[in-house]
Every structure is written in C-alpha cells, then in structure tokens.
Amino acid sequence: MKKGKLKIYAFIDSQNLNLGTSKDIIKRGKVVYKGWKLDFRKFRRYLSDKFHVSNAFLFIGYIKQNEGLYKKLKADGYDLVFKPTVKDNVGKPKGNVDADLVLHAAAIEFSKYDKAVIVSGDGDFYCLHEYLKKKQKLLRIIVPNSKSESSLLRSFQKYKTFIEFEKQKLER
C-alpha cells in the first residue's frame, strides 16, 4: 500500500505538546531551551502535509471557561477528546490524558487506522510505542523538544521527529 493510501491518525497529548514547546528549560542556571508559542492551526496542517494525517485526536483536560479555544481547535481540524479536570495541590486544573490516549490508540480507534503518529515526549507512552511497533502501526513519535524528552524514548530513535526544528513553520 502506498503511503498516500494509508489511513494515518495522530494522537496528541495536548499538555505535553503545549508545555514542551512553550516553557523555557533551565539547567544549571542556563537556558538550554527557549520556549515559543505553537500555532495549533499550522501544526494541524503540518501533520496533514508531512505525515498525511487524516484524523488528529487532541487529548485535553476540559475547563468550561475554554469553550472558545475548543471551538477554534475543532475548526482547525482536531477531534477533541476531553478529560475531566481536577485541581492539584495549588488549585491549578489538571487533566491527565495519558490513559485516554493509550485507550483510543490501542483499542477504540485501533481498527480504523493503518499507521499512528503519537505526539508527546512522555515516557509514559513507552508501552503504547512498543505495542504499535509490534503491530507495525507506529509511523512517528513527534517530540516537542529534545531537551525534555523521556530517556525511555531512546530505543525509538528512527521514529522520532522533533518539532523544535520546525519552529519557523509552526510558531504563532
């Protein structure tokens, strides 16, 4: 089957993507990564153009006040999968989407796609990467930046793409 004929889905950890691109990373008092603002519309187009992604599932914690953002993301071409949020110990909303992303990629959507693109630098997805690789469904792992990726992703070197190197194309 040609790549253009494959059904390719992306599964995106929104928190990892957003924080992975926007936060400065400081090690030993020195900025080793300067954060930037990702343009989610450009990123959706990038997924389509570069990896031929037809469906992009964005896993995100639900906060009622963000309805405008959700409407914009849907208009930009994302399928939103909401997780109820809880407040952390300082009162900040938290929506841990890892289990939901794994469930959708490995079960709910599994029979509907040929290849998967996982967007996260989080080592919690190691078992999903292994499973998809074994089933010959892992196409790419898109890591927000090389300075904060999990060491568990080392064995997936040939699958990785770092969007920090696409900053010029994807910055808001």
Image (cartoon, rainbow, N blue to C red):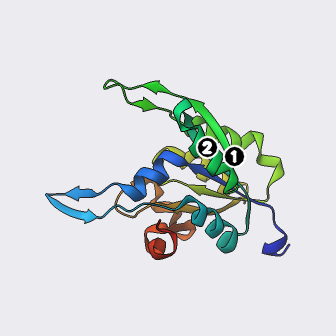
The residue to which callout 2 is attached is 70
Residue 149 in view of the camera: no
| Pick the front one: 81 or 74 | 74
Three-letter amino acid code at disc 2?
Tyr
- Where does residue 135 sit, x and y in percent of width and height? 73, 54
Q: Is residue 54 left or right of residue 99?
A: right
- Residue density around tag 2, few if under 14, some if 14–19, many if 20 or more, within 10 Å: some
Numbered disc in front, either 1 or 2: 2
Residue drawn at 86 percent across, 72 percent down: 1
Residue drawn at 59 percent across, 35 percent down: 99
Residue drawn at 69 percent across, 68 percent down: 48
Residue drawn at 59 percent across, 53 percent down: 129
Picture layout, residue 38 above or below residue 92: below
Q: Is residue 139 left or right of residue 62?
A: right
Q: Quadrant of residue 109?
A: top right
Q: Which mark is residue 35?
A: none
Picture layout, residue 171 above or below residue 27: below
- Where does residue 160 sit, x and y in percent of width and height? 53, 66
Q: Quadrant of residue 81?
A: top right
Three-letter amino acid code at disc 1?
Ala
* Helix, strand or loop at mark 2: helix
- Residue density around tag 1, few if under 14, some if 14–19, many if 20 or more, within 10 Å: many
Q: Is residue 46 left or right of residue 63?
A: right
The residue to which callout 1 is attached is 105
